[in-house]
């Protein structure tokens, strides 16, 4: 059971961090949590989220960007542990045009196969 800074009781990912909704954990430290996406779009599909409720990358500023940076620092450790030595893609969807469905900042790690060259 982890504490989430500025937790939103209605936020799916806050509830996952707090252990109220089950998830398949792949990594956790004091500042971030990583788990397998429920609908994987690649052989490896992991979500990395800060233990702070930040709605998206669009509201990052000097007051909360350290939480995002910490997620980015965790990603190479997770990728190595997952055996993604051939590469992977990091995606963070922001808002409706990008198809963001969960309004808690998250970084997708996608890998395990050759990914499409087209990004959009
Ligand atoms: P977005 O579309 O906001 O960038 O990404 C949200 C991701 O969360 C999607 O890839 C979706 O499959 C995943 N997701 C949604 N609900 C759950 C859930 O309850 N558990 C897990 N592990 N992933 C979820
Ligand atoms: Zn949240």
Image: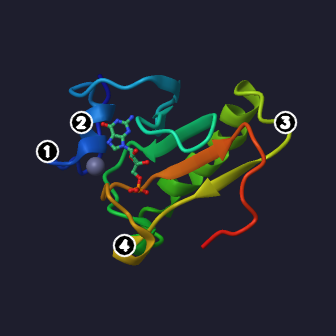
User: As displayed, is residue 35 above or below residue 4?
Assistant: above
Q: Residues within 10 Å of mark 3 (few under 14, many from 20)?
A: few
Q: Viewer-nearest of labels 1 and 3?
A: 3
User: As displayed, is residue 22 above or below residue 52?
Assistant: above
> Mark 3 or mark 1, which is nearer the start of the sequence?
1
Residue farthest bottom in this picture:
97
Q: Residue at x 24, y 28 (%)?
A: 21
Say which residue label 3 marks: 85
From mark 3 to mark 4, how far is it between C-alphas?
A: 31 Å
Residue farthest left in this picture:
9
Q: Residue at x 21, y 26 (%)?
A: 20
Q: Residue at x 46, y 37 (%)?
A: 37
Residue farthest right in this picture:
86
* Badge 1 element: loop
From mark 2 to mark 4, how far is it between C-alphas?
A: 21 Å
Q: In the drawing, does residue 91 fall left or right of residue 52?
A: right
Q: Are marks 2 and 4 in contact (CB under 8 Å)?
A: no
Say which residue label 4 marks: 95
* Badge 3 element: loop
From mark 1 to mark 3, how far is it between C-alphas?
A: 37 Å
Q: Residue at x 33, y 33 (%)?
A: 17
> Mark 2 or mark 1, which is nearer the start of the sequence?
1
Q: Nearer the viewer, residue 97 or 51?
A: 97
Residue 6, horizontal then vertical, whole percent: 24, 51
Ligand 1 shown in quarter:
top left
Q: Viewer-nearest of labels 4 and 1?
A: 4
Residue 98, horizontal then vertical, whole percent: 44, 71
Say which residue label 1 marks: 9
Say which residue label 2 marks: 15
Q: Residues within 10 Å of mark 2 (few under 14, many from 20)?
A: some
Mark 2 near ligand 2 (CB under 8 Å)? yes
Residue 92, horizontal then vertical, whole percent: 52, 61
């Amino acid at each position: 059971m982890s504490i989430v800074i500025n937790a939103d009781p209605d936020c799916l990912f806050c509830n996952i961090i707090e252990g109220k909704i089950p998830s398949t954990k792949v990594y956790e430290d004091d500042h971030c949590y990583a788990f397998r996406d429920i609908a994987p779009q690649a052989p490896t599909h992991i979500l990395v989220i800060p233990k702070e409720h930040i709605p998206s990358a669009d509201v990052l500023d000097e007051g909360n960007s350290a939480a995002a940076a910490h997620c980015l620092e965790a990603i190479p450790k997770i990728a190595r542990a997952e055996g993604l030595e051939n590469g992977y893609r990091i995606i963070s969807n922001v808002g409706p045009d990008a198809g963001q469905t969960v309004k808690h900042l998250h970084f997708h790690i996608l890998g395990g196969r050759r990914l499409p060259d087209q990004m959009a």
